[in-house]
Image (cartoon, helix red, strand yellow):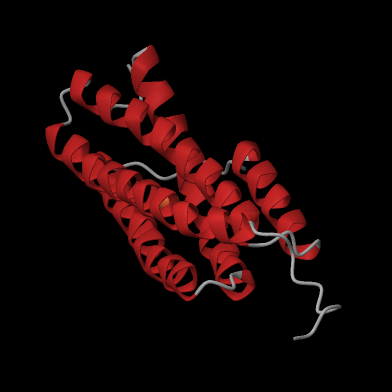
């Protein structure tokens, strides 16, 4: 993109890309902690799988910046910082899998919103190849969100049972 005459939307697009780039990199560090904290086996492997997808999301963004002949701006995604901080509280306080899934879904919804905007901006800007790349990531975020919803159905009903205090052995 020509730096001399960048449109407002091109600038918005570039800073949005830089923001989600930082967000994805924060997630690469945070997801292993969530995996470790998960009790449910399927949830653990879900986090493991999404970690490798997330690494790929970073790689795709590198590709996008290359295609645009741009570099990511140094930017901290404060929203993701906050979401991860809340996730850390869930882990520290051992709130359990239902709370962990909710924290993870808040992250996915943030990503879905971000990639949704980025994808449509890329289309408007006539960046078809970039738009397709962003769409791939958007699809993966959506399917992760759906998988988390399915896992929540299982975990929520387990956690809805009265806690076993071990006080009444039979
Ligand atoms: Fe992602
Ligand atoms: Fe994600």
In the image, 155 versus 134, the foreground residue is: 155
In the image, 28 versus 94, the foreground residue is: 94
In the image, 146 versus 110, the foreground residue is: 146
Q: Is residue 25 above or below residue 69?
A: below
Give the residue drawn at x 64%, y 71%: 37
Q: Is residue 56 above or below residue 115?
A: below
Image x and y of residue 122, in percent? 24, 28
Q: Is residue 6 visible?
A: no
State the residue lying farthest toward the front. Answer: 170
Image x and y of residue 140, in percent? 29, 50
Give the residue drawn at x 26%, y 24%: 120
Q: Is residue 68 above or below residue 94?
A: above
All told, the count of numbered labels is 0
Give the residue drawn at x 40%, y 63%: 50
State the residue lying farthest toward the top. Answer: 8
Image x and y of residue 55, in percent? 39, 64
State the residue lying farthest toward the bottom. Answer: 170
Image x and y of residue 66, in percent? 27, 49
Q: Is residue 93 visible?
A: yes
**In which quadrant is the N terminus drawn?**
top left
Q: Is residue 91 left or right of residue 132?
A: right
Q: Quadrant of residue 31?
A: bottom right
**In which quadrant is the C terminus drawn?**
bottom right
């Amino acid at each position: 993109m020509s730096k001399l005459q960048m449109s407002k939307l091109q600038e918005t697009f570039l800073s949005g890309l830089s923001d989600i780039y930082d967000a994805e990199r924060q997630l690469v560090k945070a997801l292993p902690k969530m995996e470790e904290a998960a009790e449910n086996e399927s949830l653990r492997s879900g986090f493991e799988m999404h970690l490798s997808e997330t690494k790929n999301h970073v790689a795709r963004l590198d590709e996008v910046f290359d295609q645009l002949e741009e570099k990511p701006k140094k930017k901290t995604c404060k929203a993701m910082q906050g979401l991860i901080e809340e996730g850390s509280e869930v882990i520290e306080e051992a709130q359990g899998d239902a709370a962990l899934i909710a924290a993870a879904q808040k992250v996915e919804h943030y990503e879905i919103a971000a990639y949704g905007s980025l994808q449509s901006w890329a289309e408007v800007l006539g960046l078809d190849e970039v738009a397709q790349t962003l769409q791939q990531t958007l699809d993966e975020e959506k399917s992760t969100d759906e998988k988390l919803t399915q896992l929540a159905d299982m975990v929520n009903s387990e956690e809805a049972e009265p806690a076993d205090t071990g006080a009444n052995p039979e």
